[in-house]
Every structure is written in structure tokens, then in C-alpha cells.
Amino acid sequence: MDEPSDGASTAGAAHQTWERPPDLSALNLYGWSWSSERSVDANLLDLAYLVARNSTCKDGHMGCVLARGVPNGRGGETAAALARDPVNSVAGAAGTVCPPCPPGAPQAAADGAEASPAPPLCPSVVLCATNAPLFGAHRSDCHAEALAVSECARRGIGTAGLSIYVTRTPCGPCYKLLAAAGVARIVAPNERMASADCAASAARLGIEYIWLPDSPQRAAEREALGSANEDYERVRALREERKRLRKERSYGRKSCARTAASEEAAAAQPEGGGGGSGGGVGAAAGEGRGGESGCGAVGV
């Protein structure tokens, strides 16, 4: 098969408005740090909320945090023993190295030593993720949980026994992915799981589902952190991009199939042709638009 010409490949690239999932190591954590007055779960769910501010998806911003070292039933304890400097790099946290525990905290046993009777209460952030587009700019094609588990697979990070903190209860497909990946705890602000089937499956598999409602105080503190640590150049650039995409009628819409169909139809049309075939090009360009959601995005 002949290789495509440089001109063909450049033309195709010019029409690509979709994007790869974001670089998770570049996420803005908005100055998050541990609060000794809050539970472990509240601290890490607050981090997930702040991570969600990085999302640019039209249908809502989602964030999640995968953490190691929070055994079942331990997430409600206060985090006084966990006070430490803020996490400055998600890429560094992905090494799954637990931060030093303060004196008196349960420690993992050294080689050859007798195991500690209590599990360590020093969770380490494995990685953070947002929802992300795959089929068009600013679409929520890949949910945050799916992107997090996929990123673990790509990096060779084990997911068995992890806790996940999500800003919305996982949908059915995401729950299946988390259960298959061996995630042990799901912490979300929603009272119930996505379906009775998900709840029954979680109970059978021993997956702990924690309902952790938000509070006005926590929300206000996160908003203050977000305002103080926001990249306003990024916000302005996103607003301009949204204006442009709305004008082009492509904001949050599928681009892959529609662009390919348009190019094929244009290539098949003879020079100077119009009339009947023009409607075909327009129809191909609009394919897939009817089912798009019109939900507004949250945040920037």
C-alpha cells in the first residue's frame, strides 16, 4: 500500500479537533493540602473536587483520586496524623511511595520483623484524573474513573485494594471497570450507587461504598483555593476557544466520523458540481449531532 502524501496527512491533521487524554502529571492541584481537622476521606474527596477544575468538558467537570493505604473502615478517622506538606506533583505521587508516618502511627513491618497489628494509616495518592474527550474537543467521552484505571494500566501500577474518590458516583460501566480492577473502596458525594445491580455487586464483592456529602464550609474553602490558584490565562484561552467552537457549531460535538465523512464526500464530488450532491455533504457533516447533550459545564 502506498504511503499517504505529506499533503494528505497535513490536510487530515488540520481537521482534527479532538484530542488525546490530558497529561495527568500537569494537573493543577490548586494548593490542596491535608487538613488535620478532617477525615482521610474528606481530605481526598476535596482533592478530587479541585482536580475536577482541570476538566474542560462541556457536559460537566469530573475528578477522581486513586489512593493506596486506606483499609476498609479507616477512611473516617481524622487526618491529624497525616498532616504534611501539600502534594506538589501528581507524577511524583504516582510512585505510590507512602509519605513518612509521624511517631506513634502504625508502621508497615520491615523485612523479617513482626507485622504491626494495625494496618498503616498513611494513604498515598497514586494518581488523579479528570474526564476527557476522545471523539471531539470538550466532550466527556472518557470518564475520570476510566481514565485513572487506564493510566494505572499504562504505567504498570497495581489497582487491587485501592480507594477511589470521585466527584460523582460511578456510572454502571465505570463501576464494572473499578470492580474488575480490584478497587476496594469507592467514596462519592452521592447517597446511592448508579443502580441496584451495582449496589448488589459491590456488597457481594466486598467493595465498600462510602457516601460522603459535601458541606458548605468545605465547598467555600475549595472555592477560595481555586480562585487563589487559578491560571486565568488558561481560563481566558478556554473562553475564546469555546466562542470559536460555538460559532463553528462544533463545541462538544463528535468530530472524528463527521470530518472523515465530509472529506470523503467532498473528494467524491466532481469539480463544479453542486445541486443534489451538496445536500449529501451537509448531511454527512451534521451526522451524529442529534443525540448530543446540552448540559452546561461547571467552573471555567
Image: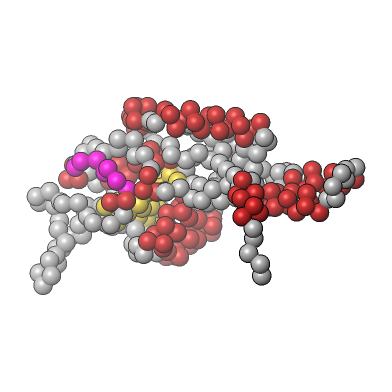
Residue at the (50%, 61%) spot, across then down: 176
Of 281 and 266, the residue lying toward us: 266
Q: Is residue 61 visible?
A: yes
Rendering colour mode: secondary structure
Q: Is residue 221 above or below residue 134?
A: above
Q: Which residue is farthest front?
A: 6
Q: Which SS type dominates the magenta stretch? A: loop
Q: Is residue 182 left or right of residue 242?
A: left
Quadrant in which residue 36 is drawn: top left
x 42%, y 48%: residue? 23
Residue 216 in sight here: no
Q: How far across and how far down the image is residue 85, in percent?
A: 20, 41
- Residue 222 sits above or below residue 119 on the image: above
Asked if 36 appears above or below 223 in the picture, the reply is: below
Q: Which residues are magenta?
A: 84-90
Could you tell me which quadrant the N terminus lies in? bottom right
Q: Residue 245: horizontal and vertical position, in percent?
A: 62, 35
In which image quadrant can residue 52 be found?
Answer: top left
Residue 53 locus on image (x, y percent): 43, 37
Whether residue 89 is in magenta: the answer is yes
| Residue at (84% x, 47% y) in the render | 271
